[in-house]
Image (cartoon, rainbow, N blue to C red):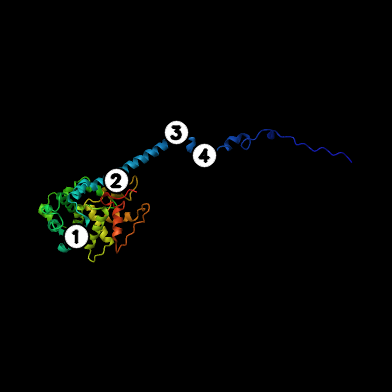
Amino acid sequence: GSPMAPQAIPIPTPEAEQPKVGGGGGGGKKQDEQWWQKLWFYNNPGYTFLGVIASIAGMLIRSSYSVGDRNRVEEAIEALTFVEPDEIAEICKANNMNANVYAAVVRDAVETLGTDDVAYPDFILIVNKLLRDHVKPERRSQPIRAAHILDRVVLSALAPRPTVDPDDPDAFAARFLEVPSWDGLIGVKGAEILQQKLPLRTLLTALSLIVDSNILLTSDALFEMLKATSPDGVVRMADLVDLVDALQITGQLPCYVQVVRHTEWLPFQRYRGADARELIGLALREKPRKGEKPLEITAENVTKDQLRALLLAKSVCYLGQCPRV
């Protein structure tokens, strides 16, 4: 047969002779850019650096104002606290009263005075008489030692109470920080002050300052106090509110736990004072410590163990004795 015709060999075009980089042609550099190289921040490093510095400075300034506002509210609460922690330790050690004796005195005081409000002179007269049966003979002439501290604590209960305005974070500090808390008592005759009646629970809570026992035993004694002053001997959530409120008044809760976040957080976080009900609510929402169960309180029948857990919660921290872990 006839010889086969040679196959046509393709002749490369000029474009084919050029190596293709990034898709070919002069547009290779643009197509080879990463997505982040197209960002404004990448192409303007000077402005980016200044922006980062400004953001950090803004955060520090905002934090500084927030801390300052918190400290201001805490100082206002301290101004309403007429007793220092070292004075609480002083009256506690001076009397060295165990929790069982306190509980017995409470029961006898309730039998004598009832559960109505009472003036401090009437209260302390009965308490001194009852304590003489429980102290050593050499102390019967002075059943309560360092009693001036107890007197001052009761005076703090007679001073005006702060009203927390949730819509105005400045109201608390403006009223009580710039004006000394003693002004509420200046100009009032001494006899008139002493005749003002206070809730019996407040006075009995103040009296617990003389107890020098394990914090759990003291908590149990306070539980017995709530039972003794309850109409039916049952401790309810409302009774816990009364107790925490009395602990606040008598300076037995740290000032820092009584400061809570305000709803206003712009341009910086504001703070305000908390009342007893809020502190209990915070304690119920606390994350439990390792190995512990979440705090639960039966509103209509509080138990002794539930009160223990509440007083040791970080949001209450009775006498500053709450575990840090």
Label 2 residue SS:
helix
Q: CA distance from mark 3 to mark 4?
A: 17 Å
- Tell which circle, 3 or 2, labels the residue nearer the N-terminal end: 3
What's the amino acid at mark 1? Ala
What's the amino acid at mark 4? Trp
As drawn, 56 above or below 188: above
Q: CA distance from mark 1 to mark 2?
A: 41 Å
Q: CA distance from mark 1 to mark 4?
A: 76 Å
- Tell which circle, 3 or 1, labels the residue nearer the N-terminal end: 3
Residue 46 is labelled as: 3
Quadrant assignment, res 121: bottom left
Quadrant assignment, res 284: bottom left
Asked if residue 289 lies left or right of residue 147, the reply is right
- Tell which circle, 1 or 4, labels the residue nearer the N-terminal end: 4
Residue 181 is labelled as: none
Residue bearing the label numbered 1: 104
Residue bearing the label numbered 2: 70
What's the amino acid at mark 3? Gly
Instruction: Indicate which label's residue lies in the foreground, 4 or 2.
Output: 2
Question: Can you give x and y, in whole percent of width and height, for residue 309 in the image?
Answer: 31, 56
Question: Can you give x and y, in whole percent of width and height, for residue 25 in the image?
Answer: 63, 35
What's the amino acid at mark 2? Arg
Residue bearing the label numbered 4: 36
Instruction: Indicate which label's residue lies in the foreground, 1 or 2.
Output: 1
Label 1 residue SS:
helix
Question: Can residue 160 be seen from the camera position used here?
Answer: no
Query: How packed is label 3: few (under 14 Cα within 10 Å), some, or many (20 or more)?
Result: few
Instruction: Find out whether the residues at labels 3 and 4 contact each other: C-beta distance under 8 Å.
Output: no
